Image (cartoon, rainbow, N blue to C red):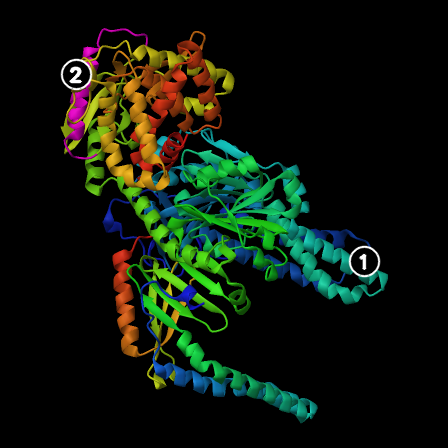
Amino acid sequence: MSASQPQHTSSADTDVTTTASTPDPATGPLKPTERPHPLTPFVRGWLVFVAIAIGWGREIITSTGENQFQPRGLLWIVPVLGIVVLLAAIAGFFSWYFTRFVIDDEELRIDTGAIFKKSTKIPFERLQSVDIVQPLAARIFGLAELRLDAGNSTTKLRYLTRSKASRFRDYLLTRAHGHQASIRDLDQQSVASAFTDLGMNDQPLVQVTPQRLIFSFLLSTEWLIPASISIIIFAGTVAFEMVPLALGALIPLLIGMLSLIWRRVIGMFNFTLAESPRGLRITRGLTNLTSQSVPINRVQGVKTSQPLLWKPFSWYRVDIDILGHAQNDGENSESTASSVLLPVASADEVELALTRVLPGFDLDGIALHPSPKRARWLRWFDFWTLRYGWDDRTLITEQGWLTHVRDMVPHAKTQSVRIEQGLLQRLLRLADVHVHTPRGPVNAVAHQVDEEIARELALSQLDRARAARAAEREHRAVQAVPADDHRSELELLAAFGTGRDHILGSGGESEVFALDHDRVLRLYRGRHEGPQRTAAQLRSLYDSWRGIDIGIELPVIIDMGEHNGRFYSVDRRFSGRNFSTWLQYADMAQRRPALISFLDATEQLQRLPSPAPGFAHLIGGRAPQQFSTLAELLATMLQGPLKTSRARLEHDIPRVSEVWQRLHADLAQRDVTPALVHGDICPPNAYISQGPSGPVVTGIGDFSPHTLNADPLMDVAGALIFLELEPYADAAADAAWLEAVAVERHGRDIIRWIDVYRRYYGFYFSNTFAFEPAVYAWCIRQLSR
Amino acid sequence: MEELFAPPAYEWQRLSPKYRSMRTLTSLIVPPMLFTIPAVIVGVASGKWWISGIIWAVAVVIVIIRLAFVTRSWRSWGYVEREDDLYITHGVMFRNLIAVPYGRMQLVEVESGPLERAYGLASVSLRTASPETGARIPGLTPEEAIRLRDRLTELGEAHASGL
């Protein structure tokens, strides 16, 4: 029993400040610190208690038994046991008594030690994951351990009540993601279920039923091989009456099999992969319950594997490399953080999980090439399974027959590359290419590739890795807020009596915070004068619509101003919920009428008057800017985005100039009376409320520099095609269905124009390639139709 | 054949000739040393010294093979500092080429054991976040090793990109 608590398993960590002295009281007013739950020493010493219970039990049994076979000599064990237990209890008590922790709005600190005081303070931003572990004994008492991963070290805080642990976990994860939050706000939140640790806001993605887990385990190659070997050995030795001879081989095999059952079945029991507002979360375990968060930005690679006998069921297992989880490499025990993303899952579930761990990656679009036929001389046992392929973001390799393994490595995570060629490979002009990733189960090797391809793959891999990292950096730069901006932002939010925890939504240009029931604060990003002009133009546009009733709520800017260089506006709050969020949790019966009302609302927008007659760009730099034809207006609109994305599009779509010319030819033929076009009519910009006969879209917000006076069909097309970008499962089906509804309303002619506007928006949003890969992938699809 | 491992448009930097001398010496000494202990044990234990003779003969054969390959092995080593990454190649029978981007290097070490010091040699090893990288250049002169270390560290900082 260890007396040091929390355990600090760290070698050379620079991330966590650990001082070997009492915290200096001069640093500030003394804060109330807490102790872990008083039952902690009992739970930690439960093994000792079990031992003593058995000892006492034995004494009672033997002393009540009448037979004389009562070796009094053995009774000396009882006092010794008693002393051991007493010492352990005292150590446990002291370790508990001297453990104090603070988790509040300012810091996360754990002080331990009676004689050698140790104070561990972990900066919130350094937290990589916060896991909850409940060993069986703790679970019985409703207690849980909080495991904090920062840098290379793991700090354990045990034990807390389960509800407290999960509240701290939620709070710490919010802070770890760089959001401001207050621990007091989380106090009122609902407490997660004791069996699955799923909170109110958690949406289970994949749940593995016990039947499937056990059945798949029995069919897995790693179980069948030792099991069949032991049966053969056992049968063989029984037949020849040499059982004792075989024990030497059988016992290690049986131990190995038991540990396999322990890891694969008991540790993975009730496995649930869930999506919470703070990222992915895994909950698993029969006796010990482990709840582990998956830090997406630390995923270094993904491996799916399929034992031979899983093929008929198309089941797969998914493992991921997580940076910093290296210590537990291969050790997927019950309570440590594991690399398993899904122990067994169907192809659909795997695909769903992959969209979450590798968001925006087009894994199906990568063509896999088989290794050349001559590889059979070297890999006669599995040459037909060797495959490799890559695109500009990911490398995929496949191999194996008894267990088919597929490794996927995002280029940005490549560490180094190695080409290897043995003597026989040289004769056959083959080589292996290893792409190195940080420690973990993923091991991408393109086996037995033709020499020249191997060279090309290896040498260009580092260029791809460099390009991918540059794109990621660009993405991060777009998201990151400079530190002094952060401070002034907090001041501004405080001045309005709101805070980061009241955030309602965020987009590329601004973030929106709740003020009260009727108003929101919109905070524009960046310090340049762009947003100011945009907001002023929007305000006069919205003012010109005052008093016009088209049956839906429109945005109203109540006030605007500047504070410490940050530009903001106070807008009227829309009633209802955000349509995009609502769509994710609604079922089809609710969704479809709501989508019709969304289309209705879109069509109503064209009744709004435009401040500039004719074809015009209404908001932005030189707006209002008028054009004599639709084609001219739209060509001007495309200039900006294409300046950034042109080279990229030319690379990704070989015949892009043809698509471009066809678009202009089509637009020149369009004959239409100009009307108001929102330009970005997607569910995140719409609001839905409960109407008398079901949910209805009641508001459209976020007019922007995309807003035009142009072809009203652009918005109708937009409402259908942007729906495909929604993250819920049936979005594409809903979009196709809504398109059929629109065609029924407007006639078959519009099919052609929807297609034209698909290409238009494909070009228009193609500058998202650096920071919104999912949108860019959508653009590519539109342009390749 | 050679093209597979040649760096595009660069010349390989080769190792110091002293490395060849050192390898010749170790090839002569190490196998007999390793084989003598079991040979003596077998001889003393069983009294059949002809078995020891066979073991020694094996050692001699290994020495001959290694000596035959010393020059080729020494010549197979090469490294080149490219704009964004370092290439290292080696191996006679089993050839390999590793490319490590400067931005991914976490640690550059110069090492020199007693034997290497006696020959005036040092080696440079590089670490990345991946344990498989295992990039090491032996047989450099100390000046070259230190130059390389400083250069790589500098380039590593310039290209640093985090993980």
- Is residue A746 located in the magenta-colored stretch of the structure? no
Are circles 2 and 1 on residues that touch, CB within 8 Å? no
Q: Do labels 2 and 1 share a chain?
A: yes
> For numbered disc 1, what is the local secondary structure?
helix
Residue drawn 63% across the image and 91% down it:
B53
**What x and y, as percent, mark residue A588?**
50, 19
> For numbered disc 2, what is the local secondary structure?
helix
**What x and y, as percent, mark residue A31?**
30, 43
**Between A634 and A228, which is closer to the camera in this rendering?**
A634
Above or below — where is B60 with respect to A322?
below
User: What residue is pinned by disc 1?
Assistant: A235
**What x and y, as percent, mark residue A103?**
36, 42
- Is residue A544 located in the magenta-colored stretch of the structure? yes
Say few, some or many: other residues with alpha carbon within 10 Å of mark 1 (under 14 / 14 to 19 / 20 or more). few
Task: Left or right? Give the position of A433 relative to A86.
Answer: left
Task: Left or right? Give the position of A76 relative to A84.
Answer: right
Which residue type does callout 2 highlight?
A: Ser
Which residue type does callout 1 highlight?
A: Ala
Above or below — where is A55 with respect to A681?
below
- Magenta range is A526-552
Res A97 seen here: yes
Res A396 seen here: no
The span from disc 2 to disc 1 (Cα, nearest Å) is 88 Å
Above or below — where is A521 with respect to A657?
above
Residue drawn 47% across the image and 48% down it:
A389
Residue drawn 42% across the image and 22% down it:
A582
User: What residue is pinned by disc 2?
Assistant: A540
Mark 2 or mark 1: which comes first in sequence?
1
**What x and y, as percent, mark residue A454?**
45, 58
Q: Which of marks 2 and 1 is in front?
A: 2
Chain letter of the residue beneath label 1 in the structure image: A
Task: Left or right? Give the position of A747 relative to B83.
Answer: right
